[in-house]
């Protein structure tokens, strides 16, 4: 391996840390009234992430990668279900009685 190339896990760690900072900065600039509509709009993206997590969990032959994939599936499922529950509650607020 050439000395000028970083290991793959280090690149993944850099991407994770940068995405945390960017996500925090983007979300902190959004007014509180817009959080629920934005969350409901990102459910499709969370669904795509869930599909990727399922593929990652089932594709590997290593135990560690399968466990991490399973945890990603659990976290993605919680995110998608919670997003739809919040969206449903928000839409019920605007229904006529």
Image: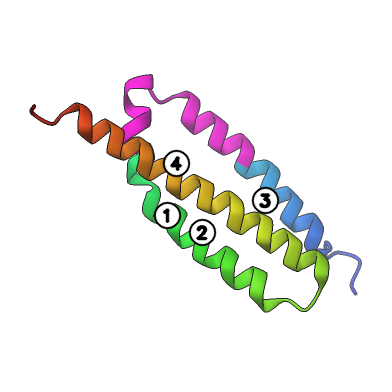
| Callout 1–callout 3 Cβ contact below 8 Å | no
User: Magenta span: helix, strand or loop, mainly?
Assistant: helix
Neighbour tally class for label 3: few under 14, some 14-19, many 20 plus, Cα within 10 Å: few
Neighbour tally class for label 4: few under 14, some 14-19, many 20 plus, Cα within 10 Å: some
Q: CA distance from mark 2 to mark 1?
A: 6 Å
Find residue 49 and name its label. Answer: 2
Foreground: disc 3 or disc 4: 4
Q: CA distance from mark 3 to mark 2?
A: 16 Å
Where is residue 20 shown, x and y percent of the image? Answer: 63, 39
Sequence-earlier tag: 3 or 4: 3
| Callout 3–callout 2 Cβ contact below 8 Å | no
Foreground: disc 2 or disc 4: 4
Tell me the residue at 73%/76% (across/down): 60
Where is residue 8 shown, x and y percent of the image? Answer: 78, 64
Question: Residue under circle 3?
Answer: 15
Residue 95, placed above or below residue 83: above
Tag 4, which secondary structure?
helix
Q: CA distance from mark 1 to mark 3?
A: 18 Å
Q: CA distance from mark 3 to mark 4?
A: 26 Å
Is residue 42 or residue 93 the one in the foreground? 93
Tell me the residue at 45%/49% (across/down): 80
Question: Residue under circle 1?
Answer: 45
Question: Residue under circle 4?
Answer: 82
To which quarter of the image does residue 93 belong? top left
Is residue 52 or residue 97 the one in the foreground? 97
Sequence-earlier tag: 4 or 1: 1
Q: Residue furthest top?
A: 32
């Amino acid at each position: 391996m050439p000395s000028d190339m970083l290991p793959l896990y280090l690149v993944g760690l850099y991407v994770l840390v940068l995405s945390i900072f960017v996500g925090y900065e983007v979300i902190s600039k959004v007014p509180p009234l817009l959080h629920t509509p934005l969350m409901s709009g990102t459910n499709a993206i969370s669904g795509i992430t869930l599909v990727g997590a399922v593929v990652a969990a089932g594709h590997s032959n290593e135990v560690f990668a399968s466990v991490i994939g399973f945890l990603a599936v659990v976290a993605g499922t919680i995110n998608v279900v919670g997003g739809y529950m919040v969206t449903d509650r928000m839409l019920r607020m605007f229904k006529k009685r």
